[in-house]
Amino acid sequence: MGSHMAQNLLKKGYQVIAYDLSTEAMKTIIEAGGQSASSPAEVASQTKQLVTMLPSSPHVMEVYTGTDGIFSTVQAGSLLIDSSTIDPAVSKDMAALADTHGANFMDAPVSGGVQAAKDGNLTFMVGGREAAYEEAVTLLSNMGKNVVHCGEVGTGETAKICNNMMLAIHMIGLSEATNLGVKLGMDPKLLAKVMNMSTGRSWSSEMYHPYPGIVETAPSNRNYEGGFGSALMAKDLGLAQNAATSTKCPTPLGSAAHQIYRLMCNSGYDKKDFSSAILFLQEKDTK
Amino acid sequence: MGSHMAQNLLKKGYQVIAYDLSTEAMKTIIEAGGQSASSPAEVASQTKQLVTMLPSSPHVMEVYTGTDGIFSTVQAGSLLIDSSTIDPAVSKDMAALADTHGANFMDAPVSGGVQAAKDGNLTFMVGGREAAYEEAVTLLSNMGKNVVHCGEVGTGETAKICNNMMLAIHMIGLSEATNLGVKLGMDPKLLAKVMNMSTGRSWSSEMYHPYPGIVETAPSNRNYEGGFGSALMAKDLGLAQNAATSTKCPTPLGSAAHQIYRLMCNSGYDKKDFSSAILFLQEKDTK
Amino acid sequence: MGSHMAQNLLKKGYQVIAYDLSTEAMKTIIEAGGQSASSPAEVASQTKQLVTMLPSSPHVMEVYTGTDGIFSTVQAGSLLIDSSTIDPAVSKDMAALADTHGANFMDAPVSGGVQAAKDGNLTFMVGGREAAYEEAVTLLSNMGKNVVHCGEVGTGETAKICNNMMLAIHMIGLSEATNLGVKLGMDPKLLAKVMNMSTGRSWSSEMYHPYPGIVETAPSNRNYEGGFGSALMAKDLGLAQNAATSTKCPTPLGSAAHQIYRLMCNSGYDKKDFSSAILFLQEKDTK
Amino acid sequence: MGSHMAQNLLKKGYQVIAYDLSTEAMKTIIEAGGQSASSPAEVASQTKQLVTMLPSSPHVMEVYTGTDGIFSTVQAGSLLIDSSTIDPAVSKDMAALADTHGANFMDAPVSGGVQAAKDGNLTFMVGGREAAYEEAVTLLSNMGKNVVHCGEVGTGETAKICNNMMLAIHMIGLSEATNLGVKLGMDPKLLAKVMNMSTGRSWSSEMYHPYPGIVETAPSNRNYEGGFGSALMAKDLGLAQNAATSTKCPTPLGSAAHQIYRLMCNSGYDKKDFSSAILFLQEKDTK
């Protein structure tokens, strides 16, 4: 993701100085006209606009607060945008630390996946101070088509994990209903049509149906390859559950969805698109 | 519901002969120009087009197969349309019995609620023979604006219970996500906006949001009065669960949703709109 | 089961007249000294003490109320004992019909499995009139070691499905806790020991532990072969769910357990002992 | 809890130097012959055997690693026993830090409740080095009757949260089964008797039945007052869920139980004994 985002910045004429553990990713950036740095600290010492894109909360903490981390060299007045999907509580911690260095930290997780990153079509959900938002929009607009201000720092992550919790619930529910309809003798295409003109419709039923042959562009038509993997969905649901536990907020279906994606990961669906829930719930030929 | 449907037929110039246990409902029909019958059998002896609208599977069995039931007098060539929301297996049983009398039975449950019944705006999901479908459409079009053929007998019920299972899952999930977002400091209106432009959207989030002040016409803005009661949703989810059990089809979220609506009924939400799930999941002031 | 029960009656000197769809089962009975009948009706015409053992509610209805069923020839004063595990509502229906013939129907499902049936060690949970109970005990004592009167007709089934719902919940919960403990680095034997001396113990943890090497006689030590199959557990949980739905009684964990056993049946665990839940929940090597 | 534990040490002739935020607790200790310290650091500077008993993971981190925390003054060779119920990962972190000071940290959460603390009847589940275990047993035996070594550091917590997850699942399941049995017309006492002689039994059904009138000493007979509060159970289930999420271990029933206790806390059962689940699941008179 990060590599595609950097390349879009380079295409728009920005100078980019990048750091990535992957030498392959670094090579791609350099070939596209970027410079390489040897650490997050080196990046932070050379620019006042930073964007981070990392797999999980501990990685973010390491890149910002570790030895050779961003905070070891960050310049006052810097804008620090983290596009990772992480625990909103960690975003708040990073923002508080940024304040002590006179920098502005914003959380700006994305929706849209690798293809949207490539095409510059990402949606950014941004949390952080109103004062820094305009500068953030200017920068992020080069990498995405939608930038939404969600409120104070952490709310970008909040919007992302709430949205993805809904998405997971919808996909499992739709898989259940479709399997049930088929078992009861109904044509799945017709069932989708009825739902989509009625009160059961969702983005999943209209744009990403898990049953093959209903939405042409959906991963269900290519053996659930590509798309958004079940392991990534399980991770996002884990973030939602952690947030729900720490705020003592009941989320019975979000929690059940989390368990189902965990079970799916344990059963070999981890790299399949998350719409493969429909297969997991069906009877398998185990003979 | 049945009374409104009959009145719409009368308005369109149909002769209507009606039977209802409720003397009030019967009075309304007679005042509107209908005739009264003393039993389902009497109705069936006088017309070859019948529409039934009943609360549950046992009522349907009684009205069709009981002493003084429809099958005791039904005429060959009759069209029997049942608009009740019931177990699709019962619809199939009734259709098989109708066949022995040379009559056509179709299941045609509705979506849209009491107001849509009044306004003639119901959607009918129809299961049954292609041959009888045209006659059914002609009749049902006087009471609704959409008539969808879902396949063989029972598929109308199947579409209805699958759709409502989705609806229940979406509403609970949306309630969870909204409560969680608010606990994490996000404005619920903004969260709804982000979801609705993203992958988490559903009919519930766009048209029937459970948080007050987001969708003007939603029951959440009138203390969850009116709308579709939690007890009715629990009933429909029970039908889905019975169908899932008899077809051995796993429906983990549908089943969890059923339990939640049952709990809500036990806790005083039975007559509140089903979007009051958001209240049930919130912290109550119990002091 | 039924065959073993009949053989125990023959051993105790009873005359037995039997009917079974399986010619193999009939052959066994005849070799053991029993007589064969050509239908349930023939049995009922020749004896006033009947015991039925059938797979599910529809079978029971057929054997009692069908053409050539028991009620077509039953003699006044007969004692009809049904040892099937079925819906308690069906037991009540059969009892009401038996009353119209002057016969006494009692539900008497068993616990203990095939081996206990062979050894005459079954436990019978009996529902039905106090007046007929003594006669029932005399008969059942030849086939089992415990006979418990649970109350009015239907309560035998109620006790059975409530007990088995608990058993399923305990087994899944214990599987979860054991998997979690192992993942966190704890020896499963030590974890079982701590639980069994503490508040987490159950019959499952003490007598039937799902992790191999803890309880010697448990199916977990023989690759989950034998024992009580997951498909049978799914069936009993389905009965519990039907009863819960018709009484509007919330059973969130019983319902979730039902879904998990259904998923297990779909994933190839249907004939494995129900303690194989621990495998289903673990990470599988899917490479 | 901590105060009762300290008093038992004083009774056995130990010198105790104590620190507690509660002035009342401190007063009790002083009256019983203990000394007071002004901070954890002061305690650690004066003794090489420390026991901590705190409400949650952040409190433990503060008391050990904060300014004036134990690690600021801890002496080489000290034995640090933490009896709090917390995240086992935090126990491991504390142990690693203790190592850098030449001290031994052990996790030793308790089961048994306030009364057992008073009576010196606690059970300690201890994780930590074999080498330090003997010294720990000598100390802990003054406060409890059972001390079990569960393995490496963190396994005491692991045993505790796995056990309590089982306990919560059993209690909810038993509440469901009892409510269902009663709805189906069965005497709850008789149902408990049948379960306890069969495969559905558990510590909860035998020792702590949630239905009044079955186990005399159970909180169900005193309006669910006293005992182990639902909020504390929700906390322990949250620890189990966090551990399950970080180890990617599916725990569908543990997770559902967590949600139910959260819902109960939101509905006013937070301070009631956790066996009040049976009330939460029943129909409430809401008129």
Image: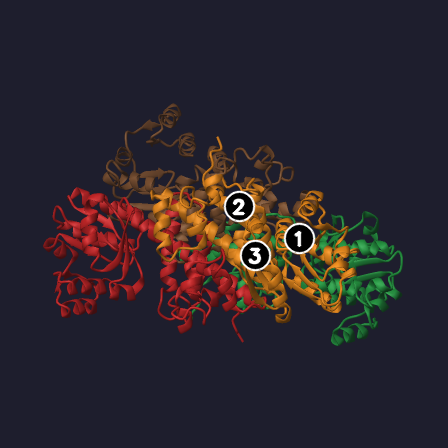
Chain colours: A orange, B red, C brown, D green
Residue C122 seen from this side:
no
Residue type marked 1: Leu
Q: What is the x, y in percent for residue A175?
A: 44, 47
For label 2, the residue is: A227
The crowd level at tag 2 (other Cα within 10 Å; few <14, some 14-19, many 20+) is many
Q: Secondary structure at mark 2?
A: loop
Q: Among all residues in the image, which is located at the extreme left?
A: B46
In the displayed structure, does residue A258 sit left or right of residue C66?
right
Q: What is the x, y in percent for residue C81?
A: 36, 42
Q: Secondary structure at mark 1?
A: loop
- The answer to whether dots 3 and 1 both sit on one chain is yes
**Quadrant of image for the C terminus of chain C:** top right
Name the front one of labels 2 and 3: 3
First in sequence: mark 1 vs mark 2: 1
In the displayed structure, does residue B281 sit left or right of residue B155?
right
Q: Nearer the viewer, residue C223 or C12?
A: C223
Relative vertical location of residue C83 with respect to residue D37 in this rendering, above or below: above
For label 3, the residue is: A144
Residue type marked 2: Gly
Mark 2 to mark 3: distance in Å?
A: 18 Å
**Quadrant of image for the N terminus of chain C:** top left
Q: Secondary structure at mark 3?
A: strand
